[in-house]
């Protein structure tokens, strides 16, 4: 089963449980117009971000011995993100050694000491400093804010701001140059593990 199939099934399940008016708001947000994102060939400035446990990890460390796969996601509260990260752990992580590559996930969520059950770094880009430079960050509209609060997610408490990131995967080489970027303004869709391996 592909990641897309699994995500579509999850979306159908979650959407059927929502009141129609909330489903309509969230569906409209999925059709958000894409902005300008970083492009292949661009160089990323080095950055250092804390993990959930507070321990810092830098981009320089991630690319010290080979390329890095950077997965930008919305937060641990997002079921689509959780499914995607678990899939990457199962299907992508075991293959990365062949390429000398490392995997790291990045979200705007504050580090809260809760360490996810994942075998790769999960980093907090609080304030979306890194994501904003890549064109991945955007403000959440008032109508979507209200829908998210109704569903029990207050981003101001979780992230510190009402700002989200478009889910994205970047492959960055040892010189911190982007060699692959795949951005998903529709947050229900994500990059297939096979496409990441092909990029590597």
Image (cartoon, grey):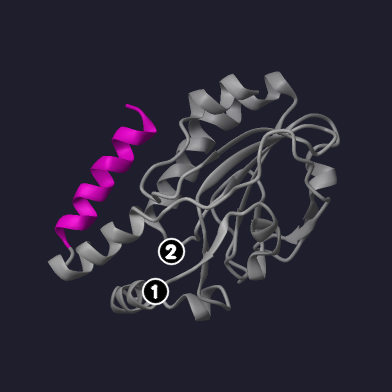
Q: Is residue 65 above or below residue 58?
A: above
Quadrant holding the C terminus: top right
Say which quarter of the image contains residue 177: top right
User: Who's the residue at 41% across and 73% down the image?
Assistant: 141
Q: Could you say whether the residue bearing mark 1 is in a helix, strand or loop? A: loop
Say which quarter of the image contains residue 190: top left
Q: Which residues are magenta?
A: 1-17
Residue beneath disc 2: 77
- Closer-to-camera residue (183/60): 183
Residue 13 shown in magenta: yes
Say which quarter of the image contains residue 4: top left
Residue beneath disc 1: 153
User: Who's the residue at 46% across and 31% down the image?
Assistant: 192
Q: Could you say whether the residue bearing mark 2 is in a helix, strand or loop? A: loop
Give the x, y percent position of residue 155.
48, 75
* Label 2 packing within 10 angstroms: few (<14), some (14-19), many (20+): few
Left or right, 198 with respect to 87, comes to right
Q: Is residue 36 above or below residue 99?
A: below
Left or right, 18 with respect to 6, comes to left
Q: Earlier in the sequence, mark 1 or mark 2?
A: 2
Give the x, y percent position of residue 199.
61, 23
Q: Are marks 1 and 2 in contact (CB under 8 Å)?
A: yes
Q: Main secondary structure of the magenta part?
A: helix
Residue 150 shown in magenta: no
Spatial CA span between label 1 and label 2: 7 Å
């Amino acid at each position: 089963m592909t990641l897309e199939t699994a995500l579509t099934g999850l979306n159908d399940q979650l959407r059927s449980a929502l009141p129609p008016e909330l489903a309509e708001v969230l569906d409209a947000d999925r059709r958000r117009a894409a902005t300008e994102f970083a492009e292949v060939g661009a160089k990323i400035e080095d950055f250092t971000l804390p993990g959930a446990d507070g321990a810092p990890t830098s981009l320089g460390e991630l690319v010290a011995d080979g390329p890095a796969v950077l997965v930008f996601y919305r937060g641990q509260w997002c079921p689509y993100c959780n499914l995607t990260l678990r899939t990457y752990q199962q299907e992508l992580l075991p293959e990365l050694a062949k390429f000398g590559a490392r995997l790291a996930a990045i979200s705007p969520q504050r580090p809260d000491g809760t360490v996810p059950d994942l075998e790769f770094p999960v980093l907090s880009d609080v304030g979306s400093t890194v994501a904003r430079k890549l064109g991945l960050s955007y403000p959440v509209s008032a109508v979507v804010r209200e829908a998210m609060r109704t569903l029990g997610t207050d981003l101001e408490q979780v992230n510190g701001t009402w700002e989200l990131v478009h889910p994205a995967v970047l492959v960055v080489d040892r010189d911190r140059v982007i060699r692959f970027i795949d951005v998903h303004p529709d947050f229900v869709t994500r990059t297939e593990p096979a496409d990441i391996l092909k990029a590597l």
